[in-house]
Amino acid sequence: MKVGVVGTGLVGATAAYALTLRGSCGDLVLVDKDEKRAQAEAQDIAHAAPVSHGTRVTSGGYAALEGCRVVVVAAGANQQPGESRLDLLDKNAAIFRDLVPQVAENAPDAVFIIATNPVDVLTDLATRLAPGHAVLGSGTVLDSARFRHLIAAHAGVDATHVHGYVLGEHGDSEVLAWSTATVAGLPVESFLRARGREWTDEVRADIDAGTRDAAAAIIEGKRATYYGIGAALARIAEAVLNDRRSVLTVSAPTPEYGVSLSLPRIVGARGVEDTLMPSLTPEEERALGASAEVLRKTGERLG
């Protein structure tokens, strides 16, 4: 199957590299307004194919997206130190108004995976600009992975045995749904007590802060985040390409909240195939509503 990546900056190129190393697809095409950058990234990544899964990696213009089953959209301005994801909206919305219709025209059968920030608002915008296409955003797949990683580190277990969701905005108002979090099928607190591990409000606050502030800390240290989101984008693409029916906290239009935001969703060949609403505490429900309100107010700027 064929995948396109539009935007070959750090996030797009890393997603393409992850797709190649994981053998997610047979053909991969990179597109960027800077054609030399796209060509160079494609050539560099192609040199990894013979020692991984043999993916055919090329570059080209929008016409090269023909036949793509999935297109990852990672084009846009990068988040700078001290800048929130929502601060990027005006610049990246202008890019999307030009880019998305061209992608839709040349890849009429593709599922769009939006990675550009602010991802929730831009998922809404892309849905309007590409009617008839399945569109979803990377949402809080990465945030949920960070949440699981930190719980696993404290519990002293492999992170694949930890489940938990971050909901709402991929940003400052995101909601860590502690009521959904489990380790090996047990609530986090029960598991930690069984192992004799400390569980206090301070520990929980540290995990919350580590999840919520991870991007800012990484950007301060090295200017950008790209490894985690690159792997997350490959994982989402695989769910579509292989019709896996994976449960992932992607962002998608959510009528009950009037905006795109992240909830656990079943992702398969048609994109989002169903949405699951976890059982939340009243406090978590209020926080999710507040997060949706942040996104609605931000989206109003687009008209």
Image (cartoon, rainbow, N blue to C red):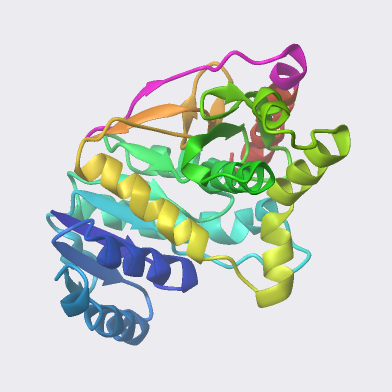
Nearest the viewer among 260 and 247 is 247
Question: Residue 199 lies in what quarter of the image?
Answer: top right
Instruction: Give the residue displayed 73% in from the left and 50% down from the top.
Output: 210
Question: Residue 111 lies in what quarter of the image?
Answer: top left
Nearest the viewer among 130 and 144 is 144
Question: Residue 32 lies in what quarter of the image?
Answer: bottom left
Q: Position of residue 207 (x, y in %)?
A: 74, 44
Q: Which region of the structure is painted magenta?
A: 269-286
Q: Position of residue 30 (x, y in %)?
A: 28, 70
In the image, is 131 to the left or to the right of 24?
Answer: right
Vertical arrangement, residue 184 with respect to residue 57, above or below? above
Give the position of the C terminus as an image quadrant.
top right
Instruction: Give the residue displayed 74% in from the left and 53% down from the top.
Output: 213
Q: Position of residue 64 (x, y in %)?
A: 17, 67
Nearest the viewer among 223 and 119 is 223
In the image, is 258 to the left or to the right of 12?
Answer: right
> In this figure, what is the number of numbered marks?
0
Vertical arrangement, residue 243 with respect to residue 143, above or below? above
- Can see residue 139? no
